[in-house]
Amino acid sequence: MAVYQEVAQTLEQEIRRNLSCGDYLPSEAELAKRFSINRHTLRRAVDQLVDAGMLLRQRGKGTLVVEHSVQYNIGARARFSESLEAMGRAPHAEVIGRRVLVADERLSISSGIPAGTPILQVDTLRSMDGRPVNLISHYLRREAFPGLETSYQGGSLHAHIENSHGVKLLRQQALIGTTLPSQREAELLQYPRHMPLLVVKSNNVRAGTSEVLEYSVSRGRGDSFEFRIQPRITDLPTGEPTP
């Protein structure tokens, strides 16, 4: 990897952790001195982040941090609230709807929950630093979480389930895709209807078993998230090359 690429990578990580939209980078002279490189190499590193849409050069003012997406880990136990708090962001989850239904064949095929099972659907609107960024529909086996329809009022749903019901949920698998928002989704997320949402459909099981207790459908603003997927390369047979 070239020196300017290494510097760009370091700057990107620091911007995501420590800076917000509207902040300015230190001057080119300060950064070049810090990384022990010449200003031409530093400019190449900054150019890479400008091209990626993370930075904007403003003549006479400096280099501005513009809106950038948050990297969100797609793992077995990743939680929206915990993940954002670890990045120094302020998450908020609001319940915007709930209803009781019975799993039909379509839901059963998607979730792995048997058709005919009583389901509690909870819809939440998630915000980051006061800005709506994500809608999640949770489909939970109702008999596994008695009283959940009244006890859960917001915040991390999985943390509430673990604390109130003693059940730890883990993501067994996830399907990632895109869709255009409906009128209601666009209004709730304050997002243009012509821009795609990132969709993650997850099957969540009781820890230590293969029993699916929750199926969730998350619709996130495409300008707010990047999903990080880290394959478990230790599971590959010895000698098999990694993809």
Image: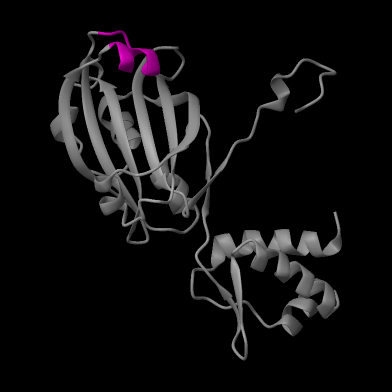
Q: Residue at x 53, y 33 (%)?
A: 75
**Residue 236: % across, % down:** 74, 19
Any magenta on residue 111?
Answer: yes
Tell me if I can see residue 153 in this picture: no
Q: Residue at x 25, y 17 (%)?
A: 144
Name the colour scheme: one colour
Q: Residue furthest bottom?
A: 60
**Residue 8: % across, % down:** 73, 63
> Which quarter of the figure is the C terminus placed in?
top right
Q: Residue at x 21, y 15 (%)?
A: 143
**Is residue 130 placed above or below 136 in the rendered structure?**
below
**Residue 74: % across, % down:** 52, 36
Q: Residue at x 23, y 33 (%)?
A: 122
Q: From the viewer's side, name the closer residue of 4 and 153.
A: 4
**Residue 124: % across, % down:** 27, 41
Which quarter of the figure has residue 160? top left
> Which quarter of the figure is the N terminus placed in?
bottom right
Horizontally, residue 181 falls left or right of residue 148, namely right
Tell me if I can see residue 151 in this picture: yes
Horizontally, residue 8 falls left or right of residue 98, namely right
Q: From the viewer's side, name the closer residue of 223 and 34.
A: 223
Dominant secondary structure of the magenta stretch? helix
What residue range appears in magenta? 105-115
Which quarter of the figure has residue 12? bottom right
